[in-house]
Image (cartoon, coloured by chain):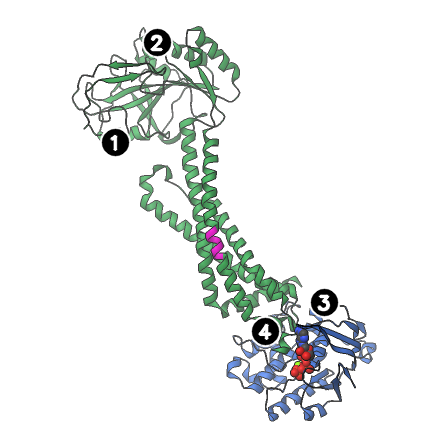
Chain colours: A green, B blue
């Protein structure tokens, strides 16, 4: 019974589309652009969101993480290290500068810049001013000029534990630091992609000079990670760093870790208020200004998501306007077709087709057209993305390995369905209203 | 399946006091006022009347294209006066065959496909082979089986009307309703079409023929004239 209706609908719909190929094609063209607009906006937003949101997690930490900036003075690094020792729910990051390569030369990327901007042109030799976190500035003596050489400047991040639960660095090659073993005397470091690129590109000898240390060490590079930073960085264990430093100098030298880098950052799991209180009490006890010990909950992703959402809504609104034009096109064609087929429809009802089935067939013809168009538009969108990635992918490393997001496909199918229903419903209702007696009066 | 004896003896269709009011641009007009008509299996009836007397309107009520405002309509003794549209569609498919003044063939379909249209209407389903067999039988019955693959544009008026009659016959209806089927044909071709239609009554079909042609009317078993909304 049902299959009789369905099969009849298929036969009649097929005959109808075949008899009006050009017209079907034309209504598909107008709809195609609308669906393509929706698919493009969805895919673009999805890809942008993925790229930006994963990077924001790498840079700022996962949402919910408790994060604190602590000035690296008055023995703070030592206090932090001692407090966090053996804990897995909190990790401190201490940043400083280091130079890898020939000793006593001016690095290729002075100031730890990305290599893209590293040209040793600008020789600025006037007075330079250094400001600390509290906003107190003092003039510094111009540095003595050093000869150019095969060396790169990196920011060096010493870790008290595995940072990846807070910042999900993506492995690129090799391994990550192992915090379970005893500290190695040959210090192990992990590079970020930019640092790895610098080492490879400029064939830097594997010597490393740490800011404040008195002698060179030869580090052991164990891996490369993607950390969302454009500046070259190296990561290493804080306890291994200490083994390179003269024992007596260790604490005081670490105190100097500030200025060029991020200083001292602590990441804690959500809800570690006790630890936060303990740390604050100890630091204030040591004489650190209590206003300078600030903790906050990371919500960068959430904030960015809501900003992206607004953008996406605006673009989606425009895409729907284009889609609406497509719907108007389909509707126009649909109404004209019904007008032309008045006698056919009256005749079909006369020979026994029910009103519902007739309306269903008219609707299904547009719906099928809409879905077919959606499929074509989704295919075009996916193909376009592949081509765009092939052409521009190398310029945007964060887009590498991107695939067509399924959300865009779903959006395209929905757009096709909605357009089919909007464009087919009115013609279907018109068709159902045609009086059968038309066949006697024509 | 053989029909029960009782149903064979009951009239095929029976109209009692049928009234139809049509709402024109101005005030409503009573087109039919108390039409009575009984048709038995194998009977043929001619309906004559001036243009605008309501012949087509009456046929559209018999064929369940439309419903009467007053009166009673029995089909095989069953009251179908107030049948819902879904069931009316099923009856149109199973019980009636329609032939119109204009042939109403779909020009993008062949003669055979046009006949098959009555089989592909959502009322049941038969295989392609079965359909083809039924279509060829119907075309054979009207004498144009050899034109099965022709499109309407290549057929003469008489041939086109015979395709339309085959379309009406393909489901083996109990009643044929023909509204001026010869109106667009010359006398000779018209005679041929009337003969084909009369042939169906010999197999037990009822035939209601609306015509302006008195010669054709005389060939029917009964001749009725519609005047002032009723038969006199
Ligand atoms: N949909 C309608 N609304 C209002 N009036 C209508 C409608 N259809 C037909 N009529 C009127 O009903 C009257 C009867 O029409 P009908 O078609 O039944 O006449 P007829 O006897 O078949 O005429 P003809 O011999 O010319 O075919 C006509 O006066 C016509 O104007
Ligand atoms: Mg008429």
Asked whether, in this view, residue A98 is left or right of residue A401, the answer is: left
Task: Answer whether residue B64 is visible to the viewer in this image.
Answer: no
Badges 2 and 3, same chain = no
Badges 1 and 3, same chain = no
Q: Nearer the viewer, mark 3 or mark 4?
A: 4
For marks 2 and 4, the one nearer the N-term is: 2
* Residue designated by label 1: A117
Q: Secondary structure at mark 1?
A: helix
Q: Nearer the viewer, mark 2 or mark 4?
A: 4
Q: Nearer the viewer, mark 1 or mark 2?
A: 1
Residue B22, by quadrant, is bottom right
* Residue designated by label 4: A343
**Residue A280, x across and y down, in percent:** 47, 12
**Residue B77, x across and y down, in percent:** 81, 74
Cβ of mark 1 under 8 Å from ligand 1: the answer is no
The quarter of the picture where the N terminus of chain A appears is bottom right
Q: Chain of mark 1?
A: A
Q: How far is mark 2 from mark 4, CA to CA?
A: 95 Å
Using the image, determine if residue A229 lies above or below residue A410.
Answer: above
* Residue designated by label 2: A251
Residue pictured at 24% horizontal, 26% vertical: A109
Q: How far is mark 1 from mark 3, CA to CA?
A: 81 Å
**Residue A110, x across and y down, in percent:** 24, 24
Q: How far is mark 1 from mark 2, CA to CA?
A: 34 Å
Mark 2: few, some, or many residues within 10 Å (few <14, many ≥20)?
A: some
Mark 3: few, some, or many residues within 10 Å (few <14, many ≥20)?
A: some
For marks 4 and 1, the one nearer the N-term is: 1
């Amino acid at each position: 019974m049902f299959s009789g209706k369905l099969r009849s609908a298929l036969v009649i719909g097929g005959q109808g589309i075949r008899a009006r190929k050009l017209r079907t094609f034309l209504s598909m063209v107008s709809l195609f652009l609308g669906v393509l607009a929706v698919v493009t906006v969805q895919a673009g937003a999805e890809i942008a969101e993925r790229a930006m949101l994963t990077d924001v997690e790498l840079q700022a930490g996962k949402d919910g993480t408790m994060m604190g900036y602590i000035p690296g003075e008055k023995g703070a690094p030592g206090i932090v290290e001692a407090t966090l020792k053996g804990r897995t729910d909190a990790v401190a990051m201490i940043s400083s500068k280091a130079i890898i390569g020939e000793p006593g030369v001016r690095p290729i990327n002075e100031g730890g810049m990305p290599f893209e901007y590293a040209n040793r042109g600008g020789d600025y030799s006037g007075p330079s001013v250094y400001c600390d976190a509290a906003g107190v500035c003092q003039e510094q003596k111009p540095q003595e000029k050093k000869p150019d050489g095969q060396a790169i400047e990196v920011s060096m991040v010493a870790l008290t534990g595995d940072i990846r639960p807070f910042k999900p660095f993506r492995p690129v090659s090799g391994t990550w630091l192992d915090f379970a073993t005893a500290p190695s005397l040959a210090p192990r470091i992990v590079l970020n992609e930019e640092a790895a690129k610098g080492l490879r590109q400029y064939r830097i000898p594997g010597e490393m000079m740490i800011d404040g240390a008195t002698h060179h060490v030869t580090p052991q590079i164990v891996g490369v990670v993607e950390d969302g930073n454009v500046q070259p960085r190296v990561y290493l264990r804080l306890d291994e760093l200490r083994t390179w430093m003269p024992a007596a100098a260790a604490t005081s030298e670490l105190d100097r870790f500030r200025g060029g880098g991020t200083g001292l950052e602590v990441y804690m799991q959500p809800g570690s208020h006790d630890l936060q209180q303990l740390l604050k009490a100890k630091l204030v006890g040591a004489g650190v200004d209590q206003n300078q010990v600030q903790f906050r909950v990371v919500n960068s992703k959430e904030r960015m998501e809501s900003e992206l959402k607004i953008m996406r809504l605006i673009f989606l609104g425009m895409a729907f306007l284009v889609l609406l034009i497509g719907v108007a096109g389909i509707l126009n064609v649909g109404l004209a077709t019904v007008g032309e087929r008045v006698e056919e429809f009256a005749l079909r009802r006369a020979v026994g087709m029910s009103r519902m089935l007739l309306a269903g067939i008219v609707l299904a013809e547009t719906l099928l057209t809409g879905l077919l168009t959606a499929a074509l538009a989704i295919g075009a969108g996916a193909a376009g993305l592949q081509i765009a990635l092939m052409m521009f992918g190398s310029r945007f490393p964060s887009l590498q390995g991107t695939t067509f997001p399924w959300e865009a496909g779903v959006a395209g199918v929905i757009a096709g369905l909605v357009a089919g229903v909007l464009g087919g419903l009115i013609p279907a209702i018109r068709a159902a209203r045609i009086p059968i007696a038309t066949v006697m009066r024509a | 399946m053989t029909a029960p004896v009782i149903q064979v003896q009951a009239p095929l269709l029976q109209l009692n006091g049928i009234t139809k009011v049509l709402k024109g641009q101005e005030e409503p007009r009573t087109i039919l006022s108390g039409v009575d008509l009984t048709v038995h299996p194998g009977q043929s009836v001619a309906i004559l009347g001036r243009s605008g007397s309501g012949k087509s309107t009456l046929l559209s009520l018999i064929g369940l294209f439309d419903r009467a405002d007053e009166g009673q309509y029995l089909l095989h003794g069953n009251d179908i006066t107030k049948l819902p549209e879904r069931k009316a569609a099923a009856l149109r498919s199973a019980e009636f065959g329609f032939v119109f003044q204009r042939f109403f063939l779909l020009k993008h379909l062949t003669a055979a496909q046009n006949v098959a249209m009555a089989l592909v209407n959502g009322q049941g389903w038969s295989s392609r082979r079965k359909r083809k067999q039924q279509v060829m039988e119907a075309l054979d019955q009207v004498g144009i089986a050899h034109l099965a693959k022709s499109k309407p544009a290549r057929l003469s008026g008489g041939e086109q009307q015979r395709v339309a009659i085959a379309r009406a016959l393909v489901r083996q209806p109990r009643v044929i309703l023909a509204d001026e089927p010869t109106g667009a044909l010359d006398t000779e071709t018209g005679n041929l079409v009337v003969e084909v239609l009369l042939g169906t009554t010999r197999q037990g079909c009822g035939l209601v023929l609306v015509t302006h042609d008195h010669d054709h009317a005389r060939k029917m078993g009964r001749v009725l004239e519609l005047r002032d909304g009723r038969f006199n």
